[in-house]
Every structure is written in C-alpha cells, then in structure tokens.
Amino acid sequence: MQLADSTALKTHQTEKVQTSIILKATPLLLHLRRGGLAELAFRSPRCISICLREENFPKMPTSATSNHPCRPEDLIGRLNSAHTPYEAKLKALRDLKNQIIGNRTKKLAFLKLGAVPSVVSILSSAAAAQGGGGDNREFYESVLIQSAAVIGSFACGLDAGVKAVLDAGAFPLLLSLISHLNEKVADAGARSLKLIYQSKRAPKYEFLLEKNMEFLLSLLNSKNENKDASLESLAAMVKENPEVSAKFMGPENGRALNVVIELMKDKHPRTRLLACMCLISIRNTSTSYLQDSGIKNTLVSVLLELLDDPGPVGDEASFVLSSLITEKEDMQKIAFNANLIEKLCEHLNAGSCQAKRLQGIFLVLGDLCSKLECCRDRVLDLQGMYALSNVASGNELHKEAVMNQLLPQAGNDTEKTLVKFLQSTDSRLRTATLWALINLTFPGSPGTCRRVTELRNAGIITQLKNMVNDHCLDVKLRARMALGQLMIFGDSSS
C-alpha cells in the first residue's frame, strides 16, 4: 500500500510539472502566432515536444537541503580552502556559475566576498597542473572551462566585475587558453575575452604589448586548429577600440593584417565569417582604414556567399553584413551592384527562414533602403512581387486583391504593373511575376475563368508567347506553365 501511495504521489507530481510547463509555453506560442510566426508555433509539434522533454522538467527534490542553495560564504570557503579536493572545487565552480548567470545582485554579493581572485587562482593552478600531463588531463580541462565561464559571467554587463577580473590577473590566463588543444577550452577562453572587451574597461594596454599581439597572431596560422577562437577574440578586441585598431594597422603589423585578409578565403565558413568581422571592426573604427576597393568588394562577395550557409553562419552573416553597410553609402552601392537585394528576396521567397535569419535579412534591407533611391525601388519591385505571388496562392479574396494591384481599373493612367514586370530586364522579377500569374490562373479555383479573360484582354497571351524562348531557364519554364494554364480556357487569338 505504501509503495502504491508513493507511485501515485510521484505520478501526481509529474503531471503537475507537465501542466506547469504547458501553461508557461502557451503564452510563448500565442506570442509567436501574433508575431506572424504561426508556422513555427503551430505547424511544428517540435515546440511542444521540446518543452515536454524529460531533461527540461524541474528535478524533484531528493532531500530537504536541496531546496536551499549553498550560502555564498560557504561556497567561497570551499573555493579558498586548501583542504577542499579539486573534485569539490569543480562542483563549487558550477554552483557559483549557476548562481550568478544573469543575476546582477548575486554577482555584486560574490564580488564583495572576493570570489573573482579565488576563481582566477583555481584557473591558474589548473592551467599549470594540466600542462604537466598525466591521467587527470580531462579533469583539469573541465576546471579550466568552468573557471573561464565563471570569469566571463562576472565580466558580462558589469564594469565592477570586469575590474575585478583584470585586477586578479585573469587576462593573460584567458589569452593563453585560446591556444589550448582542447577546442572547448579554447572557446571558453575566447568567450570570456569577448565579454571583457564589451566593457569600456577593456585592457587596451594588454593587447598593445608586443608579446600578446605576436602570441595572438601566431594562432591565426591556417594550420592552427584554434584560429576561430583567436579571430573571435581579435574581433572583440578591435571593436570600437581605435587604439588597438591603430596598433593592428601599424606598418610593423602588415603581416598580421594580411593573415586576416587571407583567412577570408579559408575553406571553413565560420573562419571566413570571423575574418570579415575582424576587418569590419577595424574598418569601422576609422574612415582611413581598409578603403581599398578590392577589400570592399571581397567583403561584400564573401558575406553574400555566406548568406547561403544553412546553419548558424548563414544566420549571422546578415548581421555582419549590416555592420558593414549601415550608414555607408559607398558600401551600399557596392552591395546593390552585387545583387544583394535579389539574394535577400530569394531567401524571403523560399519561405523557410528561421526567426533570427529573417530579422537579419530585414535589417540589411532596411540599411540598403536608408540612403539610395535605386535600392528602395528594387526592393519595392522584388520584395513586393514576391509578396504578391504568395498572396495569389490564397483564396478568392486574396487573388482578387492581387488582380487589382497588377491590372488597375480602366481609366487609371498608371502603366499596367503586370506587363511592366513581365518585360523587366531582371530575370528574378520576371520569374516572380510569372509565379503570380500561375497562382492566379490555377484551373481549380472558381474565379479563374473570369481572371483569364481579364488577363487576355490585357495582352498577356502575346507577352507569354514571347517569353517561352527567354534566355533564363526559370523564366522559360514558368512562362510555358502559365501559358498552358491559360490555354485550358481556349486561345482567343486563334
């Protein structure tokens, strides 16, 4: 009986947890729906399944003491004590990290207790210990990762934390981590350096030391496995930091600049992206840096190519591109001439972009349209026609709304939009317009016969017959498809 009662209690607790998670997820899903991301929210059961994964459930308390986090004084005592085994210190580091992440009050409380020097001391000891090799290498690497993560958390968004980290001597230790053979250790060091350099207290003088620059640049060698971590650290150091950029651009460091420029051609997409980030950060600190037309065109070309990457690199590429062209008319002209708008509209028309990628695409389109009239016209023609072609695939009300846009009523002096777009010199615009025609003349729709008559009267049949031999294969195929659907209702020209 006791066993049955215990099982029933656990079942009841689990059901309460699941109900709680669903209730918390519901506002998020509704928010996504209101934001126009209904496909993500309601067509993908993965949203709910992720929420209901077992590992996302709050763990049931196993004892009364587990409900109460370790007191800050006790935690610092465990970190400082010479009698605390390293295994216990590793656990204390994780506990400390979990308590301070995103919690400014906790960070300040632990700063007052001297947590940062304690963590830096552990980082230093672990770095020395693992350098000697032995069987405990993986354990010490875990200590390095956790120590670097804690230091980065203290530095994130808190100048007092940055000061404490620098005063404790963490900078050279973190800098040394990015050369570590373990990629996770190198990444942990790079992330912490990046967080430090987001503060105005960033240690410019440390980077200006010749030995530190030489060390960092030596890691950029194409044979080094940690060049991505090095590039990310370098990008953080030079961003909005004129002194560091000036040092980097000095005549004595021409080799270093050439190394970064060459990395834009690396075979790994993320390395190319980070190299672009470095060069853009340098360029943005002074109007006199990297003004060579060759570098400008290469930056745009590489980032355009990276937009097609299906993973995180593709998601980030548009944001990096925005940092290159925002408020810079010369770069916007180069991007426009490189057909950036068409590339972005193709991604939008694909309809499979995630939220972050969509945000980046719209950010770049906004940048392009901020200064140049030619960009605004192209976006309105392309982003507009792509939108109309999608709307034309909807119900009868949607199709009629599109017809009113493409074929203005008699007496309107405006040139017929449909004919103008079908005769465009831009093959992408011709293709998008043909897709709108195909959706408007789909045989299964009740109003198709009337729309076909209106389109014939507008001279569309003749225009389509001229397009079946178009030099663009996409246009040729879509023209034949549209013409075939129109012919189902007879050819008035015969």
Image (cartoon, grey):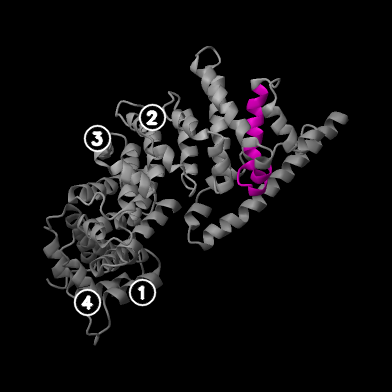
> Which mark is drawn over residue 401?
1
Q: Nearer the viewer, mark 2 or mark 1?
A: 2
* Amino acid at pointer 3: Arg
Q: Nearer the viewer, mark 4 or mark 2?
A: 2
Membership of 422 in magenta stretch: no
Query: On the image, which quarter does residue 126 sit in?
Result: top right
* Amino acid at pointer 2: Asn
> What whole-number distance in Å separates the C-alpha atoms at marks 4 and 3?
58 Å
Q: Secondary structure at mark 4?
A: loop
Q: Earlier in the sequence, mark 4 or mark 3?
A: 3
Residue on which disc 3 sits: 255
Q: Which residues lie in the magenta part? A: 87-109
Principal SS element in the magenta part? Answer: helix
* Amino acid at pointer 1: Ala
Task: Using a 10 Å C-alpha cutoff, classify the residue at mark 3 as few (fewer than 14 neighbours), some (14 to 19) or many (20 or more).
Answer: few
Badge 4 vs badge 2, beta-carbon distance below 8 Å: no
Badge 1 vs badge 3, beta-carbon distance below 8 Å: no
Query: On the image, which quarter does residue 204 sit in?
Result: top left
